[in-house]
Image (spheres, rainbow, N blue to C red):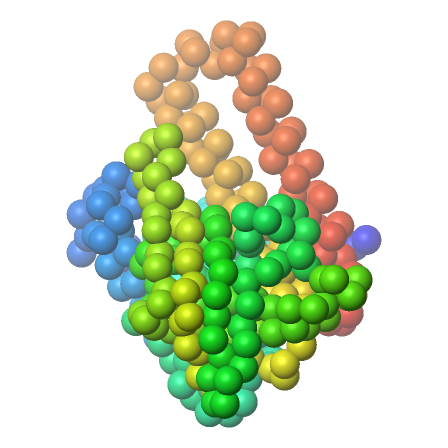
Amino acid sequence: MDFALSPEDERFRDDLRTWLDENLPPFLAGEEPIEDSAMSAETAQHRRAKWQRLLHEGRWAAVHWPEEYGGRAATAMQRIIYSEVMAEYRTPGIANPNGLWQIGPMIIAWGSEEQKARWLPSILDGSEHWCQGFSEPDAGNDLANLRTTAIRTGDTYVVNGQKIWISTAHLASWGLFLLRTDPTAIERGAKHEGITAFIVDMRTPGIDVRPIRDMTGEEMFNEVFFEDARIPLDSRLGGEGEGWLVAMGTLGHERVGIAGQISSLAADLRAMVMAARSVNPAALEDPSIRDRLARAWTDIELARLLTLRALSKIIKGEK
């Protein structure tokens, strides 16, 4: 594997840094100097949406989207560069990571022109929040074992069942959900069949979103209950029974996003060490602390290497 940057990759990185140098300081100057984690959820989301709109204006919100849909057609390597530079600059978070990184590309790949025109603009500018509804309490790590049903009745699907660990569903206007349109598939030993992807309006009657409070008091994850919720036919993404293909594409984009999380962890660790050097440098002479820092850095670098390896086939395919 050769992960050396090409001239195109270097130009991409330099263009992003130039844009951030010109736009990030004015944005931060107009904001309260406080981290997202210290804000209320509503205030933090408002700030993230404002930052995402600015990114969208510069075509830096969805760099991996095709140019005709507001992106830059970035390669997998450029997406990693993007994440690393954003972490380096410690930029604010975006309002709609699920929508930008995972759901939007699936609408582009599987959606009709009407669906693209209907949903992509609000994903780009952050005006509507999106969630992703895959996990279920009885499926565990076996996504194909999902049992929430969507039974077609005329021009609608009637949905019943439960999803769990759905991030930010309580904030979302829309969600990409996998639902079982063939209830017999599991019993037939064909559980990967009979799964269909839907764009779900989270305000639909019959949908009940219940936040799960974690040990810190935060409410990020949710249970989502469906009781005779009616989803219109034109909300189906792709054909009936093609949901597994949609899911695999979505999760492929999610893996690229993991690189961004790793980059953020590395930036946080560097910031912590720099703060210690300026405030309490003697602490860094403690052998136990130095050992813990070394272990943390080794874990981050190992995770980064494994992620790059996992993406090597994607990169080669794009070349």
Residue at 61% of width from left, 59% of height from top?
146
Is 258 rendered above or below residue 275? Answer: below
Where in the figure is residue 175, as x and y percent of width and height? 44, 67
Is residue 124 in view? Answer: no
Q: Is residue 19 left or right of residue 39?
A: right
Where in the figure is residue 173, as x and y percent of width and height? 34, 68
Quarter the C terminus occupies: bottom right
Q: Is residue 49 left or right of residue 1?
A: left
Quadrant of the rendered structure where residue 217 is? top left
Residue at 41% of width from left, 21% of height from top?
277
Count of numbered circles on the image: 0
Q: Nearer the viewer, residue 287 or 149?
A: 149
Where in the figure is residue 77, as x and y percent of width and height? 65, 60
Where in the figure is residue 115, as x and y percent of width and height? 47, 86
Q: Is residue 23 left or right of residue 33?
A: right
Q: Nearer the viewer, residue 222 or 289?
A: 222
Q: Nearer the viewer, residue 185 or 29?
A: 185
Residue at 34% of width from left, 31% of height from top?
216
Is residue 179 in view? Answer: yes
Residue at 18% of width from left, 56% of height from top?
30
